[in-house]
Image (tube, rainbow, N blue to C red):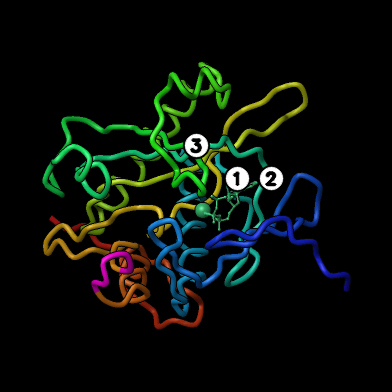
Amino acid sequence: MARRKKIYEGKAKILYEGPEPGTVVQYFKDDATAFNAEKRDVIDGKGVLNNRLSEFFMVGLNSIGVPTHFMKRLNMREQLVRQCEIIPLEVIVRNFAAGTMAKRLGIEEGTALPRPIVEYCYKDDSLGDPLVTEEHIAAFGWASQQDMDDILSLALRVNDFMSGLMYGVGIKLVDFKIEIGRVYDGDYQRLIVADEISPDSCRLWDIETGRKLDKDVFRRDLGDLADAYTEVARRLGVMPANATPMEKPKLIN
Ligand SMILES: Nc1ncnc2c1ncn2[C@@H]1O[C@H](COP(=O)(O)OP(=O)(O)OP(=O)(O)O)[C@@H](O)[C@H]1O
Ligand SMILES: [Mg+2]
């Protein structure tokens, strides 16, 4: 069998050419990085968990009419996705203050925000993904006004879906980041949710105990990252095939 062509290797994933034109295979690695890759480690099983969790979230989004790049999972670490032109923005939605926002504005972590706040960062590792405004985005032509309207509505729909899903299993969705891609259907183009949605790209806090179940466990040395991600997967009823069976998700009151 011919070796497949590697398109890109990032910090957390590798992209390979897919079997059909317009498709790519996303391979989820076990590598964890934080602070623009200044801190790094290999966490056994992280890639398997993120592959499963991203599949679970994207299948759910597709089923409620929020378009995503997800096509199908191929194996423990790989999924087939629709190839798209990634808009060079990290779209961040925040429900509670945390991380850079808490620091920048001097708000205590965990403070509920008056409403979901959407932020945009320019995707450029050499610059540390700086925060930008819609003015920058329009002036530099990274996205049109129509794109920005679509991005905002996708981001808020993802937020409502993910917040509700997490609330149902006793987890607070503090914030998350998504990437948006452009695809072409004949003469038409549209925007879809791309990349991944996983505990690497969300802040997830246990509602009762406040335990962190996301990449902050790694960033802040709070314990075993794979344990935290496994807990998220267990509560959602999403587990790697080789794991022990779990209870179905139940509503926490
Ligand atoms: N459907 C898609 N089509 C094309 N590219 C995609 C798609 N989904 C995600 N990508 C891109 O694939 C790469 C995934 O790799 P990874 O997340 O490891 O990158 P990274 O190290 O975070 O770097 P980057 O700054 O490029 O995101 C990212 O660059 C992401 O933008
Ligand atoms: Mg990435």
Across and down, in percent, residue 186 comes to 77, 26
Looking at this view, name the residue that lies furthest to the right: 2
Q: Which span is picked out in magenta? A: 218-222
| Left or right: 64 as drawn, with respect to 80 | left
Give the mark nearer the N terminus: 2 vs 1.
1
Q: Quadrant of the C terminus?
A: bottom left
Disc 1 residue lies near ligand 1 with CB under 8 A: yes
Give the quadrant of residue 9: bottom right
Residue at mark 3 to residue at mark 1: CA–CA distance: 16 Å
Secondary element under disc 1, as helix, strand or loop, is loop
Mark 3 vs 1: CB contact within 8 A = no
| Left or right: 8 as drawn, with respect to 96 | right
**Does the segment drawn in magenta span residue 8?**
no
Secondary element under disc 2, as helix, strand or loop, is loop
Q: Counting other residues with Cα less than 10 Å from the Cα at mark 2, is it few (<14), some (14-19), or many (20 or more)?
A: many
Would residue 133 be seen by someone viewing this image from the given angle? Answer: yes
248 vs 129: above or below: below
| Left or right: 229 as drawn, with respect to 27 | left
Please name the residue that numbered disc 3 is placed on: 89
Residue occupying the point 44% across, 74% down: 41
Please name the residue that numbered disc 2 is placed on: 83
In the image, which is nearer the foreground, mark 2 or mark 1?
A: 2
Across and down, in percent, residue 194 comes to 55, 44
Residue at mark 3 to residue at mark 2: CA–CA distance: 17 Å
The tag on residue 69 is: 1
The secondary structure making up most of the magenta span is: loop
Q: Quadrant of the N terminus?
A: bottom right
Disc 2 residue lies near ligand 1 with CB under 8 A: yes
Mark 3 vs 2: CB contact within 8 A = no
94, 42: nearer the viewer: 42
Across and down, in percent, residue 206 comes to 19, 61
